[in-house]
Amino acid sequence: MRLLCVFLVCVAACMAQFTHGQAARAVIGQQWFTAAVDGASQTLIGAPSGLAYANNTLFVADSNRVSAAPINNRVLVYRNITSQFPEQSATPPNQGARCPVCGGLASTVVGQPNFTATDPAATQAGLSLPTAVATDGTILAVADTNNNRVLIWNSIPTSNGAPANVVVGQPDFTSTATSVPPTAKSLRGPQGVWIQDGKLYVADTQDHRVMIYNHIPASNGAAADVVLGQPNFTTYVEPDLTQQKSDATANNLLNPVSVTSDGVRVYVTDLGHNRVLIWNGLPTQNQQSADVVIGQPDMTSSLPNNTPAMCASTGKDSSGNPLYPALCDPTLSFPRYALSDGTVLFIADGGNDRVTVYKEVPTKNGAVPDVILGAPDGVTEHTGTGTDQLATPMSLAWDGGNLYVSDTFNRRVLIYSPAAILIPLTGVRNAASLEIFAVGSVTLGGTINATDVVTITIGGTDYTYTVAKNDTFDNVVNGLVKAINSSNSGKGDPNATAEPDTAAEAVVLTAKKSGSDGNNVTLAASVSANAKITATASDANLSGGQDAAQVSPGTLITIYGKDLSDTTASDPGTGTHLPTELANTQVFIDGNPVPLLFVSPTQINAQMPLFGADTGSVSLYVRAQHSDGSPATVSTAVPVTIVPENPGIFAQGGSDPRPGVVTHGSPVANGVVSVDGSINTGDVGTVKVNGRSYSYTVTASDTLTTVTTALANAIDKDPQVTAHPAGVFTRIILQARQPGAAGEGIPFSASVSSGAQLLLTAIGLTSGSNTVLCCANTGLVTSKNPAVPGETITVYATGLGLPSAADPGYKTGRRYDGPGAQPTSSVSSLAGGKTANVLLASPLPGSVGIWQVQLQLNSSLTTDSLTQLTIAQDLYVSNIVAFPVKAP
């Protein structure tokens, strides 16, 4: 049994990996990942740089030399760090907090008397811009950069503001001067420090050298024993980089900012030469040459992002010269830190806002990393505040299972953890829209005329059809669809697929790539000279493609992946709240288990919590317990971008645009009166129902809302109709008192007094010269029971964001029973290319995360079995769904 347990632990460990673009799973120094709050306290970090780890303790140098604010001039000590941030397989503490895996509480502050003081000082207990920290678990060393020194504590401080025991680089604790020329005892702006096997290493940045002390100094002003990067201890190097003419070689340095060792090798981050140098053995001689270089193809190159030498060409310019990306996997731009445990090598590539990971320490120059953190790939600079983004990472620490990254400009330290790679980066999506494809169409018109040629051009490729004598428009549409889909040796057009819409005599085109990429597909239509047939493209490009992986608070999400659960299970639907565990599987978002509707090995449906509007990104991972007793499977954390709203309409299966889940809106005939314009005292608005007039005179205290309510109250006394304000906008809904056909055809109209600024508009089915109530119908909209122009229909959506006001019934995971909230951002709609009036957008009673949206179709719609419909909020447009409409 013991051997079996060891084997199972090994299997779990072997599954743990880093992956491109994964999210951090926890954050230190901020209350949530994207907060970026400025300040200094026991929980709040400024703009940190140096990190160190030993004995379950994390050290953070809370200052930097890249002009990120604030500069807190201190080092924070976090003891027993795993109790605050347990392994990912464990449930985080403080469940129910906004982000249980965010924050952290420092135990001790070094360099300041308390956690709120930030003043620089040149004393035995003070610091001025400390940028690096190192420890072996017993001794603490801090690179006190602006004081041109390194301070050493012979034991880890346990009280705030504890004085150092030894100073290196200065003769005493009050001196801060630099030495020109330098000496074996001097330092100038050191930004790197390391302790290894009883030795002290210092990156003496502005003297362009690394100092090695063969013993930890026990007295002030100790002399170094070995220098790297310079031939001796007294060689003067110009500190101004703009005046520095030092070409790169294997044995020189230009502004080194970090030095580390794994006990066998030494790693130096040579900032000015945009490289990391590796010595395969511990250097014992001055200016000893490095053995391997990372970030450059050779020891004499030094360009930031040296893409012509290290990256594949992306093509040629108009003159035939090769083009290269701005960066690629193996390039570096002003790297800040390199760290290895003897097997894995991590590099903080500060200028590219990323961390590169090598599964084995490189033995050849210009090695390509295996994984990139902070970006989805090696050619994208992905700076920002998201859970998967970095802004000038400055330092790293590794505890064997967690990588700590100082994310300087975001004022935080991120914790990345390797785990099983189960969910792709875009595997978390709006459960209704799933994918939002760009679409377009070409509509035919005119008359059929033999030998006319119709051409559809997609992405520069022409597809033609020649009209035959006995053709119909249906033949032409189907012929063009066949030409597009059977091209390219049967693979079809590379950019779009085509479908016939014979009711509208149109070819409907859908981009093959989802999201905004599809919006780049060009579209044109033309006909031959003197042709009688016409062809009109919907636009110059396909349009409407958006990212369904951007979700709003409260959205129902679908998580795609592998090995997400051992079995399949669904919410039983009996409780007031959704469960947070199904089939021994949980989904954690920012450390909290979230409500689940369904789990399976390849798909999970859940609800995004109701975060505040200031949450821009969250971290999601899945944990599955196994019934056979083997260790739980935990996925790598993936990022999810949070936006205020991004609606998706539920639809049936198939390819987009899919048939929408659309229902007829009312068992009684109805119509709408829209109340618009502006308030002007004395204006009179009148609504007539079958010749009966109901009027209201506007007063100075009125608003459009009060006018709407007053008119609705007056009309509600009518013997044939009821009236009430719509759930959104200032509109009055009229409904026949008798259900079904008996209420159809009741005429109504709206008018205002002469010169009035108030506007009233009657909206309904046009019958002759009258606007009438219409369209009593229930059930699903189908080809056998289609919608009609002017009818009210209902679609179901998710992702409409937060309610506009506090609603006790609208809570994370709770079945809705509230008063009928509206979304914060108003909803608009297009159906059949025409505006559909939004009458209601409210959470669906009894559901979680689902909104019902009632729409009044435009009365001028024509018959079309594939009428396309979208809803939109601000900049975000839903997926397109299709439904049948039949004009009477």
Image (cartoon, helix red, strand yellow):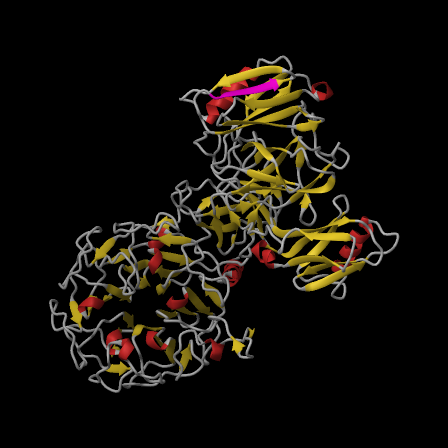
393 relative position to 878: left or right: left
Magenta region includes residue 814: no
171 relative position to 563: left or right: left
Q: How many marks?
A: 0
x then y, percent, for residue 436: 60, 50
Q: Give the camera-side residue of 152 and 28.
A: 28
Say if 878 sits above or below 531 in the image: above
Say if 592 sits above or below 262 in the image: above
242 relative position to 762: left or right: left
Task: Give the residues drawn in magenta, as a range.
Answer: 683-688
Give the quadrant of the C terminus: top right
Visible residue check, residue 420: yes
x then y, percent, for residue 319: 55, 79
Visible residue check, residue 585: no
x then y, percent, for residue 184: 19, 81
x then y, percent, for residue 58: 31, 59
- What secondary structure do most residues of the magenta stretch adopt? strand
105 relative position to 378: left or right: left
Say if 328 sits above or below 473 in the image: below
Q: Give the camera-side residue of 764 and 487.
A: 764
Where, by quadrant of the figure, is residue 216 drawn?
Answer: bottom left
Question: Residue reaching furthest right?
Answer: 470
Say if 642 sits above or below 172 in the image: above
